[in-house]
Amino acid sequence: MNIRNFSIIAHIDHGKSTLCDRFLEKCKLITPLLKEGQALDQMSLERERGITIKSHPVRLIYNNNNTQYILNLIDTPGHVDFSYEVSRSLSACEGAVLLIDATQGVEAQTLSHYYLAKENNLKIIPAINKIDMPNARIEVVKEEIIKLTGIENISLISAKNGYGVDELLERIVKEIPPPENNIEKPLKALIFDSHYDSYKGVIAHIRIFDGKVEKGTKIMLHSNKKTFEVIEVGIFELDLKEKKDLISGEVGYIAALIRDPKDINVGDTIINSKNPETDALKGFKILKQVVFASIFPNVPEGFESLRKSLDKLYLNDPSFYYEPEDSYSLGPGFRCGFLGSLHLDIVQERLEREYNEDIVITYPSTKYKVILNNDEEIEITNPSKLPEPSKIKEIQEPIANVKIITPSEFIGNVMKLLEIRRGKFINMQYLDPQRVVLEYDVPFSKIIYKFFDDLKSITHGFGTYDYSIDRWEKGDLVKVDILINGKQVDALSFITYSDEAYRKSKEILLKLRKSIPKQLYEVVLQSKIYGKIIARETIAPLRKDVLQKCYGGDVTRKRKLLEKQKEGKKRMKMIGNVEIPQEAFLSIIEIE
């Protein structure tokens, strides 16, 4: 069968999207987006940030020595937060191009993606990109790749000008094995992605492993046993292109008027309803959410609109989690889980841009394990849900194993950064005389905020990192509550180390003091740990000039007006509610 299913995997900014552009050109799949570059990065956020966020499948026709090959290419993201996208893309492939920048060499995510491809038993083709750059270190990078993979046949390319791309395509068709032809077996297809169409319902992106599917086929979703009739099948050619059927080995899409986005689960197996006993496919590694925050509509009336937007976004990005919650201070909203801080940032921007939602996002947190006095274990993703301290035996926090690759001249800077963030040294290994891999164990809560920015800053842009959460440890942790005029704002509660509680809460109160508009009465901001006030800030009241209409020197009348104003402000203070603007929540997110 002349089909090749493959992905391009690499560290962020090593040239994946540019190489995809060259593949599209070589296979004569022309689009106006090629003139701008990064044709498969169709999301406005992707083009602005210069990163791939979503995996994008495309079908290419490649002619070689009078033989026509169908290449199903799935572009993948490179940022550590989106390794979930990589894992589900690789599950639909038989091979992968491991792309490495000639000026940067093997980086943290290169290692991560390589091991992910090995776990999926994929044929790996290493390629060194940007060999035309004046600072390219081709021989050094070759040695690094051989040391990592043991593969000596390494392609040298420049995705920007097309050098070596023809030879790389030749290797793909020769070395990546074709998919097995199991068309006679009962239908078995893996859902590796999906999106929503207002007319056709959920569009499932699938890889057919066994059998075939066509219009009129009655399918069953293995996980929930729900059945649907297929109304359309097709392939990806930048846009969707309808086709008569999809057979074993092919990558494409199906529409079956599936209206509820939650019916489709990425990683689920589609089978024929006539063969309900068919076993499910193995699927792929599903990553767990590690960063949590609450999302609220700016006005309570926007709750239903936000729910629908989250349903549709979840369909396209099932790696985030959400459930309804009610906040005393902000009303109805959703508690959401994300794969990392960048993932949270992307979801926020997509909700605002693609779905026109006006939202407030609360202070992000990680997950904690709480051991109660009766040895019962519960997981807390929302600090406001932490039990009373008298019921708690201990609180455990996730520990991330962090691997950082940096030029050796910045070792001291990186070690200092990790020590400030409570990191514990594990190992140090030189890739070559100029570059080193540092391994540390760091509390995950200390790398949620701005860690990547700080690392880039102290290594002049050359440091990269990857992490995995591998265990939990007991921590000296406390919950801090924020009060406004004596009322607790549950959405501002957070968990932190006891020796950092005062500094952190003081910074939050200062941010709130600057963000909350002045009222006609005094507003008192306080932070509290287990009933004890530890910090306080005050927003002075607006002073209305009640003496404006007074003239002459009647002091008693002036005094009466001022006393009347004072009494009025006391009453307002007792019954007044303070509105917290969105800017206050956004400014707090940056504190660490």
Image: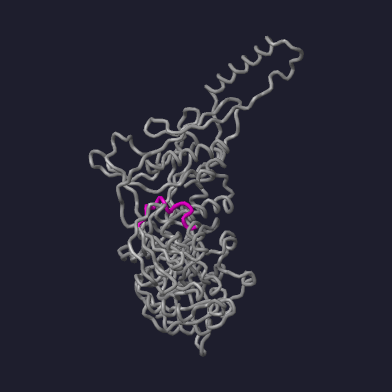
Task: Provide residue 375's location: percent of width, then percent of height.
Answer: 23, 42
* Residue at image coords 43%, 38%: 502
Q: Nearer the viewer, residue 186 or 216?
A: 186
Magenta region: which residues? 441-452
Quadrant location of the N terminus in the rendered image: bottom left
Residue 95 drawn above or below residue 335: below
**Which quarter of the picture shows residue 160?**
bottom right
Q: Position of residue 176 (x, y in %)?
A: 42, 80
Vertical order, 211 against 530 (above or below):
below
Q: Is residue 550 above or below residue 264?
A: above
| Residue positioned most to the right | 552
Residue 587's place in the image compared with 262, above or below, is: above
| Label total for image | 0
Query: Where residue 366 sits: x, y (%)?
Result: 40, 48
Image-quadrant location for residue 520 = top right
> Where does residue 384 sit, x and y in percent of width and height?
40, 38
